[in-house]
Amino acid sequence: MKKKLALALALILAFSLAGAALADEPPMPIHPAPPEGWPAAPADPDDPYGIALIHAAVPAAYEGQITVDGAAVDLTGIPGAPAGYLPMRAVCEAAGGYVAWYPQEGESFFQLCGAGITVDLADLTVKLSNQPVDGVAAYLDASGYTFLPVSFLATIQDFQADDLGGGRYDITTQPERTEMETLAQTIQATCAINAGETEPAFLELLGFDLDNYDELVALSPLFNITSDVLLIAQVKEGKMDAAKEDFQAMWQRQYDNFVRYLPDQFAKVKAAQTVVSPDGAHLMLVISQDPAAAVALFNAAYPKAAR
């Protein structure tokens, strides 16, 4: 499993946030100019992320072609941006991530390939997994659409962008996955589970004993606005009871988070399912809008062995 340790810190911060709203674009004051003193076009050779390009002329509509994992991204209606900048909402959604924004903090958030990217809409500065990134600036269209340089995005693990020239980019975001990780993806898509891949280190902070598992895949919320959780594990022999305690602790955490907050999310917590697979070796916790569908897929993946 490819995991990113830095994401654990972002997840810890995210669990403490509440009251955020998801939106297409933020209807708030926009600052399309870079911070004072940044270089002017043409770009400086020592400007690795193309920050100077945001001073250049920008077309009215986005020019170029983008494919993500072999599928063309619909760029209809997306405003123009400087050369070398990608439209974040379109790319994130095509890659299975999502967008959130925080009007009180004046920040946009993008979840992409398991990494958390925060853009300060006042000065265009960028954080990756809550850590400031020097020398990277966002570009914001007057409508509020956010763009980031492809050269910066290419530094994210599992995000590969091939520049084909002429504003055409072929993006690959699908790492090699185990059968369990693929099952988790299928359940996530089928049941519309709004959660992101979770670091083992973060689970340890929640009290999980990783020695209970041969393999453990976890999807949990990046923000405290959804109760959705998916845990799937191959449990070591003799460790099923201990694993159930770990899973119960995760469920209890969500119960405590939502018992007095967002009734629709609390309803999902109350309807959660924790099940042992027919083969007796796997365990799943699902908190979602459709737990029954998740259970059906889980049971089908790990049927009882034929005698």
Image: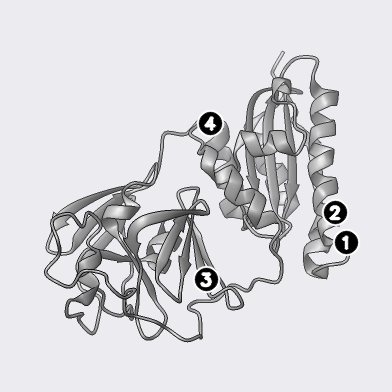
Circle nearer the N terminus (3, 2): 3
The x, y position of residue 45, in whole percent, is 13, 56
Residues tagged 2 and 1 counted as in contact (Cβ below 8 A): yes
Circle nearer the N terminus (4, 3): 3
Q: Nearer the viewer, mark 3 or mark 1?
A: 3
Amino acid, disc 1: Val
Graded by Cα atoms within 10 Å as few (under 14), some (14 to 19) or many (20 or more), the crowding at tag 4 reads few
Q: Which residue is mark 2?
A: 255
Q: Which mark is residue 259?
A: 1
Amino acid, disc 2: Tyr
The x, y position of residue 164, in whole percent, is 15, 54
Say which element carries label 4.
Answer: helix
Q: Nearer the viewer, mark 4 or mark 2?
A: 2
131 left or right, relative to 37: right
Circle nearer the N terminus (1, 4): 4
The x, y position of residue 1, in whole percent, is 51, 31
Alpha carbon distance from label 3 to label 2 = 28 Å
Q: Residue furthest front?
A: 37
Residues tagged 4 and 3 counted as in contact (Cβ below 8 A): no
Circle nearer the N terminus (3, 1): 3
The x, y position of residue 239, in whole percent, is 79, 19
Graded by Cα atoms within 10 Å as few (under 14), some (14 to 19) or many (20 or more), the crowding at tag 1 reads some
Q: Which mark is residue 107?
A: 3
Amino acid, disc 3: Glu
Looking at the image, can residue 70 be seen?
A: no
User: In the rendered view of the protein, which quadrant contains the C terminus?
Assistant: top right
Q: Which residue is mark 4?
A: 179
Near-viewer residue (301 or 229): 229
Amino acid, disc 4: Glu
Say which element carries label 1.
Answer: loop
